Amino acid sequence: MVIYPAIDLYGGKAVRLYKGDYAQMTVYSEKPEEVALDFKAAGATHMHLVDLEGAKVGKPANLDVIRRLVEAFDGFVEVGGGIRNLETVESYLSIGVDRVILGTAAVTDSAFLEAALAKYGHKIAVGVDLKDGYVAIRGWTEKSSLTAEDFFDKMQALGVATVICTDISRDGAMQGTNRALYQQLSKKYAIDLIASGGVSSMEDITALTAMGIHGAIVGKAYYIGAIDLHQAIEVAK
């Protein structure tokens, strides 16, 4: 299993939200490049970035910061948050991002998703945020009518290679990840599944590794010292 340490960006700073609430934001670092270098020093080969402002306004808001992070980390980088058109996808790939994550647009704009997949293939991943069993969109502020199964059925049919799946109720809450959800999805779908939201202990890392899922995103647990990144990477191997 691949460990993806995460940096969520807002105003050029590394932050975390509690359960997706922009009003409950904690700033962890004013210098996210230093965080990326710490990830690298711990042995991380992959990094997950989210432009939280981009998710809110629908266009990139931290492009220069992300460029610097890509250079500092010098590994595999995926980025999500507010990617609504092919120009934005291209702008990220042109600065060295390896994979671009479509979120809201994957739900609301099938034509864009299909065009992105046709043009960029495996460089496109889809991020799905689940709230009470339904897909949430627009930076978690709206709940759609799509169930998790509806969504995954559609993604598999379209040939999406990688899905980052977040259970919003667990995100940033340090209550453990939704292992039952990931077990169910990984058994049913032939998609590289990345668990996100609530990965808060080494027990979570061990359990997700045992399931054989592709990856896990480690966010708040890293910042507060609940998960030792180097140890998590070694266990996940």
Image: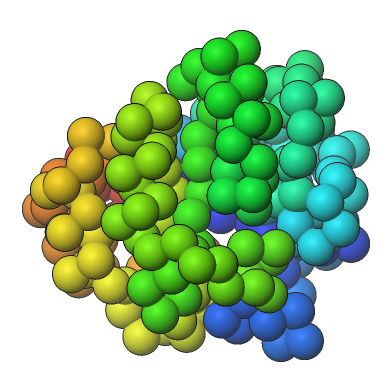
The foreground one among 97 and 178 is 178
Seen in the picture, residue 227 relative to 184 is either above or below; the reply is: below
Image label count? 0
Which quadrant holds residue 134?
Answer: bottom left
Seen in the picture, residue 104 relative to 220 is either above or below; the reply is: above
What residue lies at 63% left-to-right and 21% top-to-bottom?
A: 115
Q: Position of residue 232 (x, y in %)?
A: 30, 55
Q: Position of residue 103 (x, y in %)?
A: 60, 49
What residue lies at 75% left-to-right and 79% top-to-bottom?
A: 22
Seen in the picture, residue 11 relative to 22 is either above or below; the reply is: above
Picture colour scheme: rainbow
Tell me: 177 left or right of 166. left
Tell me: 198 left or right of 103. left
The foreground one among 21 and 96 is 21
What residue lies at 41% left-to-right and 28% top-to-bottom?
A: 158
**Is residue 159 shown to the viewer in this render?**
yes
**Is residue 38 shown to the viewer in this render?**
no
Q: Position of residue 160 (x, y in %)?
A: 41, 30
The foreground one among 171 and 65 is 171
For the C terminus, give its image quadrant: top left
Which quadrant holds residue 117?
Answer: top right
What residue lies at 82% left-to-right and 51% top-to-bottom?
A: 58
For the N terminus, give its image quadrant: top left
Q: Position of residue 12 (x, y in %)?
A: 86, 56
Farthest residue in the top direction? Answer: 119
Tell me: 197 left or right of 187. right
